[in-house]
Image (tube, rainbow, N blue to C red):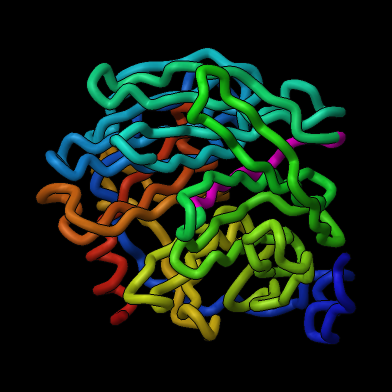
């Protein structure tokens, strides 16, 4: 059950406070993906697979929530496409033996949520469908994965459009995958973005017009939501959308959130959730073929060496307005973000 909200978050439930957003420095993208095929609101959420043996050969997965899911290289070239109706958010985990499991929230049936499962063929650089599996009543919206440290069990969190969060256990060791719902949690209004810190077993969820929350990720833990940051119109502007992590050490690092309402990205320090700064993604210049981002839904961040363009990590953001082309995803060097914010 959801606990009573502190007054500071209750204020955000009624309306977003009138305020001027904090200034955000501009960081330029190094690359962008080929545009998705669908027009209007289509591209949504990315996931990143880092090739440890050859970082420059890493892959980015991105959903087109009208028709399917793409695999891109680090230059943004589309390598493959897998048709699938109405996939929204996507996440992945690399399992023992190097098998990469990809999970997406499936909205094809708006009355009954599903999870679509794939394996990532890292050699052929394409997704292999495993099937779609029912979760519970409601429209699937957000999706993120968690690998439990104690036993390497794989769990998923499906964020329903009404704010319910269904946790599922994903069994992929057998010939046929199995997905079982193990518990449910609830936020008061529409939510979508989520991410799990595998180090601490903490689930972070964005309630779009209210703010950010955390839960204990283990299915045996209480379903109590703890408020950690509010939509205040200054540091975080509604809608609060995609979430990503930059882990450092045992518990430190940053939580990054798409501040969609003012086309920015806000960082909070882990684990105390103090405000750390914000930035925007802008164009390289008036003659640049790569524009900035706006109205970002999903984001993803992976640290480590991704080759010369991304020596410390790769940040990927959906671009809601890529005119005159259809929507796509922008790639940004984490080193540029760190420098711009003085982290």
Residue under the point 52% across and 47% down: 153
Q: Observer-nearest residue: 197 or 155?
A: 155
Along the line of sight, the residue nearer the viewer: 282 or 259: 259
| Horizontal side, residue 291 vs residue 92: left or right | left
Residue 94's x, y, as percent? 37, 41
| Relative image position of residue 315 (x, y in whole percent) | 35, 53
2 with respect to 53 (left or right):
right
Q: In the figure, 231 relative to 302: above or below?
A: below
Judge whether residue 142 can be spotted in this image.
yes
What x and y, as percent, mark residue 16?
A: 78, 71
Asked if residue 161 is among those painted magenta in the image, a careful observer would answer no
- Which residues are the magenta region? 137-147
Which quarter of the image is occupied by the C terminus? bottom left
Indicate whether 47 appears above or below 173. Answer: below
| Residue 48 quadrant | top left
The one nearer the camera, 202 or 171, is 171
Front residue of this view, candidates 191 and 222: 222
């Amino acid at each position: 059950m959801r606990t009573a909200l502190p007054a500071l978050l209750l204020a955000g439930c009624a309306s977003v406070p009138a305020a001027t957003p904090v200034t955000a420095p501009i960081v330029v993208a190094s690359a962008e993906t080929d545009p998705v095929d669908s027009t209007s609101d289509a591209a949504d959420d990315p996931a990143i697979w880092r090739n440890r043996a050859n970082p420059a050969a890493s892959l980015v997965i991105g959903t087109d929530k009208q028709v399917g899911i793409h695999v891109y290289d680090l230059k943004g070239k589309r390598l493959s496409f897998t048709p699938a109706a109405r996939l929204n958010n996507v996440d992945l985990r690399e399992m023992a033996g190097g098998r990469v499991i990809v999970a997406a929230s499936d909205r094809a049936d708006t009355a009954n949520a599903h999870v679509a499962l794939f394996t990532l063929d890292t050699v052929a650089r394409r997704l292999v469908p495993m099937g779609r599996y029912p979760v519970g009543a409601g429209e699937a919206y957000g999706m993120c994965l968690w690998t439990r440290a104690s036993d390497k069990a794989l769990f998923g969190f499906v964020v329903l459009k009404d704010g319910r969060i269904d946790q599922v256990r994903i069994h992929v060791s057998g010939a046929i995958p199995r997905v079982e719902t193990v518990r449910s949690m609830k936020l008061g209004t529409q939510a979508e973005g989520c991410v799990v810190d595998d180090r601490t077993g903490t689930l972070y969820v964005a309630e779009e017009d209210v703010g950010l929350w955390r839960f204990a990720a283990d299915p045996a833990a209480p379903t109590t939501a703890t408020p950690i940051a509010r939509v205040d119109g200054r540091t975080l502007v509604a809608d609060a959308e995609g979430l990503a992590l930059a882990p450092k050490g045992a518990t430190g690092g940053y939580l990054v959130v798409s501040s969609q309402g003012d086309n920015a990205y806000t960082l909070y320090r882990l684990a105390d959730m103090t405000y750390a700064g914000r930035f925007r993604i802008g164009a390289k210049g008036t003659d640049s073929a790569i524009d900035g981002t706006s109205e970002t839904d999903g984001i993803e961040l992976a640290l480590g060496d991704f080759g010369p363009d991304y020596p410390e990590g790769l940040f990927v953001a959906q671009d809601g307005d890529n005119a005159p082309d259809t929507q796509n995803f922008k790639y940004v060097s984490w080193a540029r973000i760190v420098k711009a914010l003085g982290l």
